[in-house]
Amino acid sequence: MEHPKAIGDRTTLAVMLALDHAGYPILVPFGENTRYDLVIDEGFRLARVQCKTGRLRQGAVRFNACSFYAHHRNPREPSRDYLGEIDYFAVYCPETQGVYLVPIEDTPVRRLGSLRVDPPANGQRQRIRFASLYEIATVTVDVRKELLVTPGTAGSRA
């Protein structure tokens, strides 16, 4: 099983590629103890971005809209939302290869966010957040189990 940190790092890289492609200058905070992963320069303000890995489930990209602290011995709170601490969720979904930039105001549920990929079976259109409205890019991440090194390339030793 892959370590969650490796999955999160890959998501952050995919998000950074998408944001750069969309024309956002990107700033990276120093250290690990901020509630956001990136900052983007929107020209008129700096906006805090929390990167999340989405999973395609039942026709929607689902992502955690809070942090979980169950791995700590005695957490004060088992989960904590991001209200007032971020401006956007940037969600990368490996199954769709989409990167979605979602304003926190558009995520009314504070535990699990959802972006609809397939049309709802019942035809509902109101209060549905369609993934296509938030997609800023598609990013292909090819994860290989082993590193392939070709002799004679830069960085190899004779």
Image (cartoon, rainbow, N blue to C red):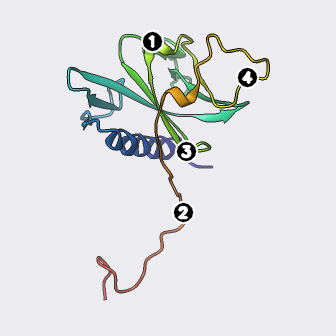
Give the labeled residue for mark 1.
105
Do the CB atoms of the residues marked 3 and 2 lie less than 8 Å apart? no
Which residue of the protein is positioned furthest toward the right in this rendering? 122
Circle 2 packing at 10 Å, graded few (<14), some (14-19), many (20+), is few
Mark earlier in primary sequence (3, 4): 3
Give the labeled residue for mark 4.
120
Kindly identify the residue that appears in the image at 79 percent across and 23 percent down: 121
Give the labeled residue for mark 3.
97
Amino acid type, residue under disc 1 in the picture: Glu
Amino acid type, residue under disc 4 in the picture: Pro
Q: Quadrant of the C terminus?
A: bottom left
Kindly identify the residue that appears in the image at 52 percent across and 21 percent down: 65
The label shown at residue 144 is 2
Q: CA distance from mark 3 to mark 2?
A: 17 Å
Q: In the image, is 89 to the left or to the right of 156?
A: right
Q: Secondary structure at mark 4?
A: loop
Mark whose residue sits in front, 2 or 1: 1
